[in-house]
Image (spheres, grey):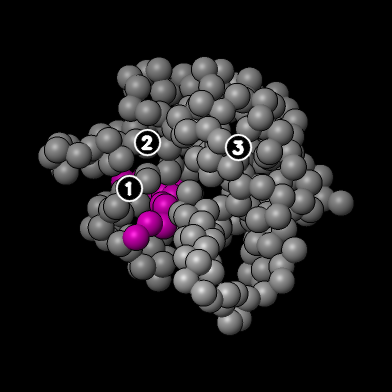
Amino acid sequence: MTSTAEKAVRLQELHAAPELLLVVNVWDAITAKVVAETPGTQALATPSHGIAASRGYPDGEKIPRDEMIAEVALIVRTAGDLPVTADLEAGYGDPGGTVARAIDAGAVGCNLEDQMKPLAESVKAVEAAVAAAQSAGVDFVLNARTDAFVKGAGRDPEEVLAEAITRGRAYLDAGASNFFVPGKLDAAQVGRLVEALGERKVNLIGIPGSIPLDTAQKLGVSRVSYGPWSQNVALTALAKLAEDVYAGGGLPAGTRKLN
């Protein structure tokens, strides 16, 4: 069995490699099993929104931290030797303690969002998370996230991009491994982020209308994950099944037994 420390090194290698790391997010044991057993999977990631929704909570740290960590631990066990990175939102008011709990559960990376809090406060959160990982002796992949674009509606796009770059530099300087910029960014914006922060340092989310994966690869992006969208794909299929059944149909052709 691969140790937590070994998984952390592997996840760091995957982020630094020239090939774009693709991570399909999972939110419970069965989704972790299905994705882990799919050829091509190199790592797993959890979505905070997806786990919260599966347990009946809205997004935004409404799910108790204990419940979130418990689900991460279950996914880690299901993933076997694959490294797992967890979405820990903003750290539940205790980023260092939350990262320590995630490492105890077997996670070797995390997303930590800034929620556009004052920069100094956000940098302290990154520093606390880094310190917790160092205390645990794990080369943890801290994916520091900015909500600059998510919360940038109505602002000058140039100002939003400039603020994202400022925050990215500050988080990387504070010890973050990578910089996560969710939102619908075009190729020019992504290119400028990579130019300012370095190749294999910028991570994106795949959403409807996002840049193609081959473009992200060429621009020097490190990773693309899918957040709650993988759950939305599964739920869309479930809703479609219910609609078809109620209309007199049945299971779609090509359905596979995966559990």
Residue 243: percent from left, percent from top: 47, 65
Kindly report the distance in space between the C-alpha atoms of the residues bearing marks 2 and 1. 10 Å
Residue stretch in magenta: 196-208
In the picture, the disc for residue 55 is 3
Identity of the amino acid at label 1? Answer: Gly
Q: Nearer the viewer, residue 255 or 82?
A: 255
Looking at the rendered structure, the kind of residue marked 3 is Arg
Q: Residue at x 30, y 62 (%)?
A: 209
Nearer the N terminus, badge 1 or badge 3?
3
Q: How many marks?
A: 3
Instruction: Tell me the residue at 60%/51% (across/down).
Output: 26
How far from the left and from the top, in percent, is residue 68?
63, 32
Residue at mark 1: 183
Q: Disc number at residue 145?
A: none
The location of residue 54, given as percent across then percent down, is 58, 42
Q: Quadrant of the C terminus?
A: bottom right
Q: Which residue is mark 2?
A: 146
Please state which of the two labelled residues, at mark 2 or mark 1, is closer to the viewer.
1
